[in-house]
Amino acid sequence: MKRSEINDVIREMEAMVKRSGVHLPPFCHLTPEQWACAGAEYDEIRDNMLGWDITDYGLGKFDQVGFALITLRNGNAAQPERYPKTYAEKLLYLRQSQYSPMHFHWRKMEDIINRSGGNVLIRVYLSTPDEELDRETPVSVSVDGVRRTVPAGSQIRLTPGESITIFPGLYHDFTVEAGSGPVLLGEVSQCNDDNTDNRFWEPVGRFPTIEEDEPPYRLLCGEYPPAK
């Protein structure tokens, strides 16, 4: 992705968050210059990859496949003594045209909440023992505490305020319902580890290769410099 494209989508998500009446923590507003001077007191943000995260899954077509997110809080299973939180929280932003590919998590359970905007469609499949899509077995899911069973491959439609629980091993993808507008999602989960806990059905990348065509507006969560 071009840095200019990343800068634009961050500004776009900031505007969506503001329209939705949500306030971001101070570290989301730090400039690259401020990060260059940040000391060890910011290590929880660095070590747990809090902050901005823009992905095109390495496919180079962000308008079709990808999304923007902010990790607001997170623990760290690799350093539980230092970071004992057992939970994480994110905000996710999808444009109307965007898709997030089919995947599951080996360890993480999460609730996906439609916070604002349009309607999100979440397709679900159980996984087989060899980690393929189970295209036959119906899926039992909890939508805002109400249990329902749907055919394999069904899309669960979440309007603003609605949520679904995604358990480990449940394949799911995201897309925005046509004509409903961009969506701001929330995610409340167990600790998040994007380096080791994502099983994509079709192999994709997770973090973008960046073409530096202009200075960064905000640093992404993997770009923070070491503490001064």
Image: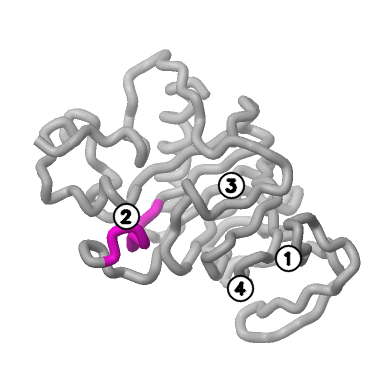
**Which badge, 3 or 2, comes first in the chain's sequence?**
2
The residue sitting at the bottom extreme is 146
Kindly identify which residue carries mark 2.
24
The residue sitting at the top extreme is 213
Residue toward you, 18 or 106: 106
**Which badge, 1 or 2, comes first in the chain's sequence?**
2
Residue 117, compared with residue 207, is above or below; it is below
Going by the numbered disc 4, the residue's amino acid type is: Thr
Kindly identify which residue carries mark 4.
165
**Which badge, 3 or 1, comes first in the chain's sequence?**
3
Going by the numbered disc 1, the residue's amino acid type is: Arg
Residue 128 x %, y %: 78, 63
Q: Are marks 4 and 3 in contact (CB under 8 Å)?
A: no
Q: Secondary structure at mark 1?
A: strand
**Which badge, 4 or 3, comes first in the chain's sequence?**
3
Indicate which disc residue 94 carries.
3
Q: Is residue 135 left or right of residue 38?
A: right
**Which badge, 4 or 1, comes first in the chain's sequence?**
1
Is 73 in the magenta? yes
Extent of the magenta region: 71-80
Kindly identify which residue carries mark 1.
157
Residue 203 x %, y %: 68, 39
Indicate which disc residue 115 carries.
none
Residue 173, compared with residue 220, is above or below; it is below
Q: Is residue 100 left or right of residue 110?
A: right
Which residue is pictured at 42% across the width and 64% down the height?
Answer: 191
Residue 54, compared with residue 195, is above or below; it is above
Mark 4–mark 1 distance (CA, rounded to whole Å): 13 Å
Q: Secondary structure at mark 3?
A: strand
